[in-house]
């Protein structure tokens, strides 16, 4: 066997593999022995028909396909191993037969490979640096959120419904005197002030008492999703059955100890430390993204479709996991949006192409700048991970998969790369940009959120920035 590799267009290589007559004959004999039991010929026991007899009955090329597949499976991986310094395959090859005779057999594999990326500039660029800080208000908000999650529900008696209460209600709506789809429900739990229903509805339920029935008059927004209801007035007859309020735990020493701290001050310090770590991580992630995005503006690469499709599959998988986490079956969601899986996957194409280009840039710069990770640095990261799960370093390392060590090594290199890029570019603080923008541009009023009408049944989740 001999082979020849030739670079082709669109980041592919053509590998022409040529086999000798003896190799081809041996492959056919092997295919015959593996498949002879499938054939029967009168006068012979099944599985005992000679090869030349089967070729007379079924044609000379009876075992060609299996023979070609065997030759490819045997030799193609070995060729890739020999050529690993020359190119990196990134997808399955397109196979064809160049020549097929008793004297010569040629197999042709056109393989997509990782492309080279041409980077115009990666230093001396003006790039925004993101910096997020933690305030006392952030700490208080986080603590209040924790108290909200740990709050107990208590049924209320002797007072009217107030903002923040959860009320259990029946409602029946009419528009122009006619009931409409989704406009009624029984035993519906609504948190007042949540903005779940259209404007004016929840505000009019505030002040109602248990057992009271009241007509609530509202007007559907002009941008309401149901065409027949846009901008029209409606009346909902509401009966209130129960009022429940949240009782938040007091922020005291008992609560602090429950959260793993000795005092309220210690608990607040612990919350601040966590938020500061999160803010630092967010600052670095967004700054790194800004750096690579600016560098990518002057970078070019002929990215093969196989790399883009692989990244699309990854993004699609993440989306499906997100839906399942929300309790939504991906097939049901695709049916709701009226697309097949392949059609929906194309929504990720632009993002996938951008992500692949960014990855190629990072790999190219690490190689060009000769960035390495030392054994000491890897050992330190392993020790940190071991400590985080309460294990001794040596014990933890024995349980690690080799891919975990590869990931750690790669992560160290990427961190070093972005440290270098941040030090060698003109990094402008986002705080300075925000202050300048605040002086020049009047503050805009936040856009109003779209409100839902009272409805008895929920539709599948619509695609939003939160559940993409």
Image (tube, grey):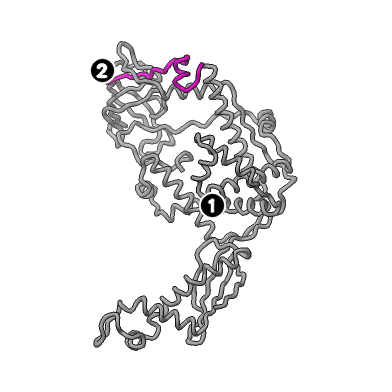
Image position, residue 94 (x, y; %)? 50, 69
Q: Earlier in the sequence, mark 2 or mark 1?
A: 2
| Residue 454 percent location from the top left of the image | 34, 31
Circle 1 crowding by C-alpha within 10 Å: few under 14, some 14–19, many from 20: many
Which residue lies under the disc numbered 2? 211
Name the residue located 40 percent from the left edge and 52 percent from the top edge. Answer: 339
Q: Which of 51 and 299 is in front in this view?
A: 51
Residue tagged 1: 352
Looking at the image, which residue is at 33% across and 22% down?
A: 167
- The residue depicted at 26 percent of the width and 17 percent of the height is 211
Q: Does the magenta stretch include residue 249?
A: yes
Q: In which image quadrant can residue 113 be found? A: bottom right
> Which residue lies at the image location 57% right of the left edge and 77% below the top edge?
2
Q: Is residue 117 above or below residue 436?
A: below
> Residue 370's x, y, as percent?
70, 52
* Of the two numbered discs 2 and 1 in the rendering, the one whose residue sits closer to the viewer: 1
- Calculate the distance from the C-alpha at mark 2 to the C-alpha at mark 1: 56 Å
Image coordinates for residue 425, horizontal then vertical, percent: 73, 43
In the picture, the quarter occupied by the N terminus is: bottom right
Mark 2 secondary-structure assignment = loop
Q: In this view, does 26 lie above or below 394?
A: below
Above or below, 14 relative to 194: below
Q: Start and end of the magenta stretch?
A: 241-263
Closer-to-camera residue (254/65): 254
Marks 2,1: beta carbons within 8 A: no
Whether residue 293 appears in this view of the structure is no
Which mark, by number, is residue 432? none
Is 345 in the magenta? no
Label 2 crowd bin: few (<14), some (14–19), many (20+), radius 10 Å: few
Question: Element type at marker 1?
Answer: helix
């Amino acid at each position: 066997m001999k082979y020849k590799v030739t670079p082709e267009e669109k980041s592919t290589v053509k590998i022409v593999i040529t086999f000798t007559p003896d190799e081809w004959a041996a492959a056919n004999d092997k295919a015959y022995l593996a498949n002879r039991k499938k054939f029967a010929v009168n006068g012979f026991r099944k599985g005992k028909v000679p090869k030349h007899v089967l070729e007379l009955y079924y044609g000379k090329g009876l075992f060609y396909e299996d023979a070609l597949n065997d030759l490819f499976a045997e030799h193609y991986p070995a060729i890739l191993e020999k050529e690993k310094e020359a190119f990196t395959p990134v997808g399955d090859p397109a196979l064809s037969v160049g020549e097929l005779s008793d004297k010569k057999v040629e197999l042709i594999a056109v393989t997509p490979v990782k492309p080279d990326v041409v980077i115009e500039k990666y230093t001396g660029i003006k790039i925004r640096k993101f910096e997020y800080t933690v305030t006392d208000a952030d700490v208080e908000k986080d603590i209040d959120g924790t108290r909200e999650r740990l709050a107990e529900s208590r049924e209320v008696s002797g007072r009217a419904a107030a903002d923040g209460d959860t009320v259990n209600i029946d409602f029946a709506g009419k528009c122009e005197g006619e009931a409409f789809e989704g406009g009624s429900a029984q035993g519906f739990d609504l948190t007042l002030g949540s903005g779940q229903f259209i404007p004016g509805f929840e505000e009019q339920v505030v002040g109602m008492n248990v057992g009271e029935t009241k007509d609530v008059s509202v007007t559907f927004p002009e941008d309401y999703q149901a065409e027949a209801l846009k901008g029209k007035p409606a009346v909902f007859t509401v009966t209130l059955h129960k009022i429940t309020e949240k009782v938040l735990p007091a922020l005291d020493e008992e609560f602090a100890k429950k959260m793993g701290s000795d005092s309220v001050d210690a608990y607040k310090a612990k919350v601040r430390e966590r938020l500061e770590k999160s803010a630092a991580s967010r600052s670095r992630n967004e700054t790194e993204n800004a750096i690579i995005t600016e560098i990518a503006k002057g970078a070019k690469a002929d990215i093969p479709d196989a790399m883009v499709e692989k990244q699309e599959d990854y993004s699609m998988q993440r989306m499906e996991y997100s839906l399942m986490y929300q309790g939504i079956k991906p097939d049901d969601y695709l049916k709701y949006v009226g697309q097949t899986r392949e059609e929906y996957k194309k929504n990720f194409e632009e993002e996938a192409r951008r992500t692949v280009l960014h990855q190629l840039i990072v790999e190219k710069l690490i190689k060009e700048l000769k960035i390495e990770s030392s054994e000491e640095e890897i050992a330190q990261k392993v020790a940190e991970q071991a400590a985080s799960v309460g294990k001794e370093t040596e014990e933890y390392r024995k349980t690690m998969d080799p891919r975990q060590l590869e990931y750690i090594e790669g992560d160290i290199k990427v961190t070093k790369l972005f440290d270098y890029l941040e030090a060698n570019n003109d990094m402008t603080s986002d705080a300075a940009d925000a202050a300048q923008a605040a002086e020049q541009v009047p503050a805009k009023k936040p856009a109003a959120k779209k409100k839902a009408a009272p409805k008895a049944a929920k539709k599948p989740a619509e695609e939003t920035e939160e559940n993409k």
